[in-house]
Amino acid sequence: MRVGELAKRSGVPVPTIKYYLREGLLPAGVLTSPNQAHYDEEHLRRLRLVRALVDVGGLSIAAVREVLAAVDTRDDSLHNKLGAVQEAISQPGSVELDPLAVRDVQLFFARHGETECADVAESNVTRMLAAALSAARSVGHDHFEELLDPYLEGMRLIARADLEYIARRGSSDAVIEAMVVGTLIGDAVIKAVRRLAHVQVSREVIGDGFDG
Amino acid sequence: MRVGELAKRSGVPVPTIKYYLREGLLPAGVLTSPNQAHYDEEHLRRLRLVRALVDVGGLSIAAVREVLAAVDTRDDSLHNKLGAVQEAISQPGSVELDPLAVRDVQLFFARHGETECADVAESNVTRMLAAALSAARSVGHDHFEELLDPYLEGMRLIARADLEYIARRGSSDAVIEAMVVGTLIGDAVIKAVRRLAHVQVSREVIGDGFDG
């Protein structure tokens, strides 16, 4: 297909596609005449992945380049690729970490046999968790870590649905694109659904009539 | 206690306490001399709630005033108060809503017997969900709503743990403070725990060896 059709099918405007081509985020098309290039389904999938990383993930061009390098590494399992992409799209804020929160996180990871990624210096995901527990401690909630085990149980249920959702895609690029979208937009969906679950469960547990 | 001790026990600096007093977010203390006031445990609990709303919830002073009015409504159930506070701390971004996403949300609410809060014009939580599904549609993910049911299942599990966590508090102010902190900091914790769950479940389902 020509660049105009690529733009139409992907929803990405032509000037943006040309920018991605210049930045090397999208491989060049096959020239069919001196100023006309031909693109295929592979380009379309890659373009969708780049757009998800930029638009949904808010990644910089440099970060997108790193993610694509991880995606394109041969001899690596899909599981490892997904892990690398997940780290790239999980940027914890610059909260100061409370050593007690860091210890809570390490105990939690140890409890679940995940000692490999328990180091806050090594993993964005681990640092993100330690940052959230530090924030809880800073407002006097020292036992928030009690919630980690039930949270993991609920999230494992959700992760199975997520994995099914992304596994339905054909190519590696499409799987990873679905993971980026699913992870980041999924966070927002989960936030909203959690509030509905609170309303439902509070009605069941506390009841409408209980006077506070 | 005097204002200095109130500051020490709450972790809120004296000038901030005086500002909250002027703004009417904290009831005046009992004057023990012309320029000395006495505060009690009630003040401490209210101060912790105000701080959670401002620091963790990022609410404006006007929004805090509204939440406190809801909390202080007599003849209302704790369940209804929790609902009102939850609406106040759930501000959806100003994303344009896709009518198809709105329809998906309405079907989802109907499926779960929650027709009362299914109107995006009436509920921030509903609008938040419709905004997230609109974002998914804008990047070509038209079937993201398939995930809503498993998400709700996982979130109900988590909501039970949340409700247990907040129900342990004694007073209505403390319950609501725990709900604000638990909801907002909990969102960040859940985001991080979800990533751990993805790693675990992807290892179990895809396996380390599967080549992508």
Image (cartoon, coloured by chain):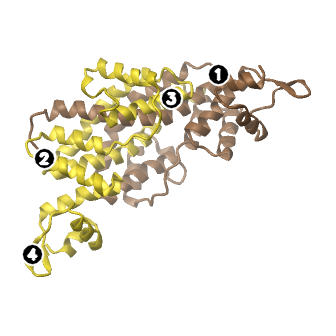
Chain colours: A brown, B yellow
Callout 2: SS? loop
Q: Residue at x 23, y 39 (%)?
A: B83
Please, which residue is most extreme toward the bottom here? B34
Give, as a three-letter code, the residue at label 4: Leu
Looking at the rendered image, the quarter that the N terminus of chain B falls into is bottom left
Q: Residue at x 72, y 33 (%)?
A: A17
To which quarter of the image does residue A156 belong?
top left
Residue identifier under label 4: B31
Residue identifier under label 1: A171
Q: Nearer the viewer, mark 3 or mark 2?
A: 2
From what the image shows, is residue A102 above or below residue B136? Answer: below
Q: Nearer the viewer, mark 4 or mark 1?
A: 4
Distance in Å between CA atoms under marks 2 and 1: 56 Å
Please, which residue is most extreme toward the front here? B121
Mark 4 or mark 3: name the one nearer the start of the chain: 4
Q: Are marks 4 and 3 on the same chain?
A: yes
The foreground one among B53 and A67 is: B53
Residue identifier under label 3: B136
Residue identifier under label 2: B73
Chain under disc 1: A
* Left or right for B67, reference A8: left
Distance in Å between CA atoms under marks 4 and 1: 72 Å
* Left or right for A102, reference A197: right
